[in-house]
């Protein structure tokens, strides 16, 4: 007899496998990896992922693994099949035995020697059915809640990818329509390039209703660097799904802004976004804050109180510093993610909620898992869609754009007029490594606004550190200000670096040891940069 602890260990291994097997793929390769991984993990004969054609009530397979091979071009009418009740009831259907007897009109079941079946609809954030995930077997399939819970995790991954593909297509269509309108447009804060180097950063005040955002109008997120654009592209991909998002990044990178961007771009944007910092409350109060409590549940509980999950019902909850969540509370959070239910402290009544979870941490949660400080199954349920925020030191000219916006904000708050940031000060800002990221930059700018002359340019505080400034190779240690590269020079450096990576990988772009992996960027980003920089195989072994 298998004990529950053995089931738990097995299912944690399954969760680990689904994340690892699909992490490097998108599109058709993602669906193939997911279907095969699902069949192998549940030890079933077949697994398939389909898209739903509502008008014709047909399912078309994105990937179908059967036995030990792929079934190509699989499409079928759902009438009379076990998939029909899945679609019509919009719920998981588990038929542990005698599926052919129950669905005698399904012509595909007998040739497959099907005995058991399990299917689940893939639903978008608007509850519209996007597709369907199913498995079948040639032997009876045990009916267990934990098995179904693991199946739902696979479904969440498939749903997120379907939504991503849909959002990407919509974005491409919108970009094609708007491209001409956007040409020549500039943000509130910009660098005027008059030949070389960085000139004065001007601050425009004639359109106060604009505070300066990245494309996509994500409030408060400023920047145009490739890394920040990649992060925002991932926000667009996941926003309209219900998938859990785990935001990682160093302290001060603005993880909360990205959590707000996910919520504000989702179909839940008219519902609450509720925040809880897991590091700011004593361990004995976090459970009450999350799930609420009944009157008299503990000393000081003089009245019934709703918790953050109840307040966020229909919307999004942002759990900041999730790595600080006490170990004894992690199973309760896991239950909310898995079942959408909990009991308030001091109550035996189960409360059902519909809440999307976005979590953030500056810790390496996998290390925390290895050290026994964080549950592995909770990590995989939170990390359905990872989102990494780059540190400020990797964002190049974004530092100047953010500094300009922060200068305007601080000056307005203090009732002071600052005309811009001169070249000498901009160079200092770009040279510094910013270990405290945007939060540190904000503090530096606020001090500078205080000490700068009224009506003049921004002057950095004389104590602004230069000791940690980046020093490009070959620069004299006596030079206080490192060389500033022009946009053309930066482009050439990037081009040479990409060519080196491609030559090293024998011009393999994606996959393990591919050029994209060496550069630590997505293969799609590498392909677009190669096209933009004119990199092709004629550069083989040139560098």
Image (cartoon, grey):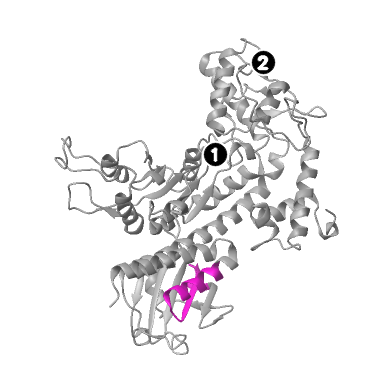
Quadrant occupied by the N terminus: bottom left
Residue at label 2? 457
User: Quick check: 190 left or right of 488?
Assistant: left
Bounds of the magenta span? 31-60
**Magenta-colored stretch includes residue 112:** no
Residue 163 % position (x, y): 52, 58
Out of 113 and 447, give the one closest to the viewer: 447
Numbered disc 2: secondary structure:
loop
Hey, which residue is sitting farthest left in the picture? 296
- Is residue 56 in view? no
Residue at point 14%, 40% (across, down): 296
Hey, which residue is sitting farthest front in the picture? 477
How crowded pointer 1 is (Cα within 10 Å; few <14, some 14-19, many 20+) is rated as some
Distance from Cα at disc 2 to Cα at disc 1: 28 Å
**Magenta-colored stretch includes residue 47:** yes
Residue at label 1? 218
Residue 371 % position (x, y): 41, 53
């Amino acid at each position: 007899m298998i004990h529950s602890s053995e089931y738990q260990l097995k299912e944690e291994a399954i969760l680990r496998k689904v994340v690892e097997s699909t992490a490097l793929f998108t599109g058709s390769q993602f669906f193939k990896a997911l279907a095969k991984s699902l069949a192998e993990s549940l030890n079933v004969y077949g697994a398939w992922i389909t898209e739903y054609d509502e008008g014709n009530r047909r399912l078309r397979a994105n990937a179908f693994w059967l036995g030990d091979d792929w079934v190509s071009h699989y499409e079928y009418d759902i009438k009379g099949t076990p998939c029909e009740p899945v679609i019509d009831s919009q719920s998981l259907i588990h038929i542990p035995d005698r599926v052919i007897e129950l669905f005698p009109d399904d012509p595909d079941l007998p040739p497959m020697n099907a005995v058991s079946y399990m299917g689940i609809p893939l639903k978008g954030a608007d509850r519209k059915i996007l597709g369907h995930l199913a498995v079948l077997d040639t032997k009876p399939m045990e009916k267990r809640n934990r098995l179904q819970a693991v199946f739902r995790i696979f479904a969440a991954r498939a749903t997120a990818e379907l939504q991503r593909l849909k959002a990407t297509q919509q974005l491409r269509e919108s970009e094609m329509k708007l491209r001409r309108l956007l040409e020549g447009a500039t943000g509130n804060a910009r660098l005027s390039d008059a030949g070389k180097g960085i000139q004065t950063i001007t601050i425009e005040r004639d359109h106060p209703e604009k505070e300066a955002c990245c494309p996509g109008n994500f409030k408060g997120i400023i920047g145009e660097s490739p890394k920040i654009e990649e992060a925002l592209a991932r926000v667009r991909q996941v926003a309209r799904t219900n998938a859990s998002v785990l935001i990682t990044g160093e302290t001060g990178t603005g993880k909360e802004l990205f959590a707000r961007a996910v919520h504000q771009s989702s179909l839940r944007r008219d519902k609450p976004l509720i925040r809880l910092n897991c590091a700011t409350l004593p361990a004995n109060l976090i459970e009450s804050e999350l799930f609420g409590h009944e009157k008299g549940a503990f000393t000081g509980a003089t009245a019934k109180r709703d918790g953050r999950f109840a307040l966020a019902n229909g919307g999004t909850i942002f759990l900041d510093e999730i790595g600080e969540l006490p170990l004894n509370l992690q199973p309760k959070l896991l239950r909310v993610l898995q079942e959408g239910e909990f009991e308030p402290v001091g109550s035996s009544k189960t409360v059902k909620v519909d809440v999307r979870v976005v979590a953030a941490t500056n810790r390496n949660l996998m290390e925390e898992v290895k050290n026994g400080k964080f549950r592995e199954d909770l990590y995989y349920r939170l990390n359905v869609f990872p989102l990494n925020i780059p540190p400020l030191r990797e964002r190049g000219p974004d530092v100047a754009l953010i500094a300009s916006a922060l200068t305007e904000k601080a000056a307005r708050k203090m009732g002071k007029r600052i005309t811009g940031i001169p070249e000498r000060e901009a160079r200092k800002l770009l040279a510094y490594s910013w270990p405290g990221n945007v939060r540190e930059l904000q503090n530096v700018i606020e001090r500078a606004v205080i000490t700068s002359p009224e009506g003049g340019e921004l002057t950095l505080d004389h104590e602004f550190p230069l000791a940690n400034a980046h020093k490009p190779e070959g620069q004299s240690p006596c030079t206080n200000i490192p060389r500033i590269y022009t946009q053309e020079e930066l482009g050439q450096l990037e081009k040479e670096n990409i060519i080196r990576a491609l030559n090293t990988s024998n011009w393999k772009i994606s996959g393990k040891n591919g050029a994209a992996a060496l550069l630590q960027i997505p293969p799609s980003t590498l392909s677009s940069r190669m096209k933009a920089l004119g990199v092709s195989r004629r550069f083989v072994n040139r560098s």
